[in-house]
Amino acid sequence: MDITWFGRNCFRITERGHTSVVTDPHKPAKGAPELKLRANLVTVSHQLSRHNVDQVKDHDYVISSPGEYEVGDLFVTGIPLHIHDLAKDRVLDNIAYLFEFSNNLSVLHLGKLRQVPDQSMIEQLDEVNVLLMPVNGGAGLPNEQLAELISLIEPNLVIPMYRGKDDSADGGPIVDGFLKAMGVGQVEAVDTLRVSMSLLPEQTQVALLRASSVLI
């Protein structure tokens, strides 16, 4: 399985011969090229003006609500989470998606997480191999709470996603603060993370991805 990050909450998850997924495709920044991604399935975790499903070509399915779905050989569970916008006194939808592939690998995308999920949500999870975790500095959950949540979910790998100045994961205060809370030193960022059952670490590890500008 290959996982590529395109900035913010947008990932492309692919494996030859299996259903491919793009999460939360977004409009490109001003002056930047379109993403022009391809996938069988597109998921949308929360409704924001910058989300743009049209950035994904040839997709067969779009999921934007909680529930259980089968798309080809992929089983998807949409778990309802909520964003409490205290400043505007409103509650917004947020959906976590658990992708369970037929090769037994599972990926959990937490969307725009702004508060610790209920225990009932965590109990819905069985085994999570890869956790896509929103890391937003002062705009989201404190890093210490993120670290506690990761210890409850117990994934093999954690990939931080965030919106930075250039959406890169080469370092910077947002990434450095998260790594410190996880008790992790410097981690080298890669363009694409290749994941297989045989290479999964027994203890949770953090992997960093560079935001890709490659048009696929």
Image (cartoon, rainbow, N blue to C red):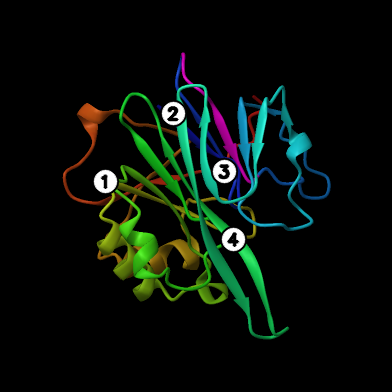
Q: Secondary structure at mark 4?
A: strand
Is residue 20 within the magenta segment?
yes
Is residue 107 within the magenta segment?
no
Type of amino acid under label 4: Asn
Q: Residue furthest left?
A: 202
Residue 94 tag number: 4
For residue 76, above or below residue 8 = above
Type of amino acid under label 2: Asp
Q: Give the magenta-colored segment's residue range.
A: 17-24
For residue 141, above or below residue 10 = below
Do the CB atoms of the residues marked 2 and 4 lie less than 8 Å apart? no
In the picture of the structure, the residue carrying the numbered disc 1 is 156
Q: Secondary structure at mark 1?
A: loop
Magenta portion: prevailing SS class: loop
Separation (CA) of disc 1 from disc 3: 21 Å
Q: Residues within 10 Å of mark 1 (few under 14, many from 20)?
A: some
